[in-house]
Image (cartoon, rainbow, N blue to C red):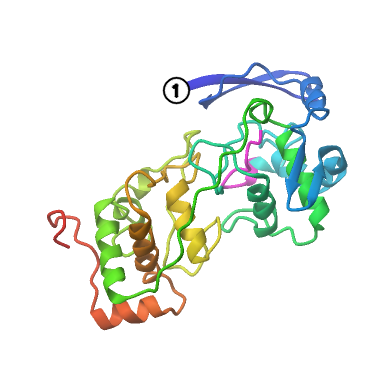
Amino acid sequence: MRRTLGKLSLVLGATVVLAVPQVSWAQLSSSQLEAWLNTPAASSHVGNITGDAKAAAMPYRRYCVGCHGVLGDGNGENAVWLDPKPRDFQLAVFKCRSTPTGTLPTDEDLYNTIARGMDRSNMPQWSTFTKDERANLVAWIKHFSPRWQTEKAGAPITITPEPEVTPERIKAGREVFARVQCWKCHGVQGMANGPSAATLTDDLGRPIQAFNFTDGTRPKCGDTDQDIYRIFMTGLDGTPMPSFADNIKPDEAWDLVFYLRTFMAQKSKEKEMAKQLGLKPVDPNAPAGQQ
């Protein structure tokens, strides 16, 4: 469903209307954003650190406004040159979360994203910020969207203990990869060349690429086994990557993690086991359960 979001420019004072999915709030003005700076939502809590949005005003202007814009709408002066486009904080739709699909991320999720950066984008690792500065920026990000005024962050999903990797689990992961049709986007060898890859768009209709597991880059939301598990159990909101929490069990999710490791360029015990097994790519035409 598409509804309209009005965004008022601080510089020109002109209203710009942008069609976006699942948005229902009224026009946002500079005065409204300023008012939200004085609400409890314009704060963050990461461990024993409390972030203050107002304290992030200057760091945001110095380091972030060129891409994310004065209004946090992703329309900074550099945005026209960037692909993928900067995050629109007004929508409060985030890829990297520990929370269920469709819910707001935790403060720690945003805090970690600032530090980690986003591979294959212009979002760098902001290792120059102190922990307090990062927490302040999280609070500043939250003041841009009315969602933070009425919604709480989702409860982080439970990641079950990682089992020992075995050849049987890798083979089981191959079955999961075939069953939930990961190959349609990522390709049968994880090279992002599946039959649907060229047609993918994000929720705003912009072209988007499936992740290539073989090219040596890391997943955008982290590269540990737990990170990869979390990605397909929460989904990457705003993208075609859905949550599979309702389709695969926790044990199957770990099997899939192990199978995906066999695609990656880095050396791993999973790759060695797959080589010893003589594991072949999935066959899209094979009957269910007969890979």
Residue drawn at x 82%, y 58% is 130
Judging by the rendered image, the residue that carries numbered circle 1 is 1
At numbered mark 1, what does the secondary structure look like: helix, strand or loop?
loop
What's the magenta region? 80-89
Q: In this view, does 59 lie to the left or right of 254?
A: right
Q: Is residue 225 left or right of residue 254?
A: right
Q: Position of residue 46 (x, y in %)?
A: 73, 50
Q: Position of residue 148 (x, y in %)?
A: 67, 31
Give the quarter of the figure containing the C terminus: bottom left
Closest to the observer, 78 or 180? 180
278 in magenta: no
Q: Where is residue 47 in the image (x, y as percent from the top left)?
A: 73, 53
Q: Position of residue 33 (x, y in %)?
A: 77, 26
84 in magenta: yes
Give the quarter of the figure containing the N terminus: top left
Closest to the observer, 160 or 234? 160
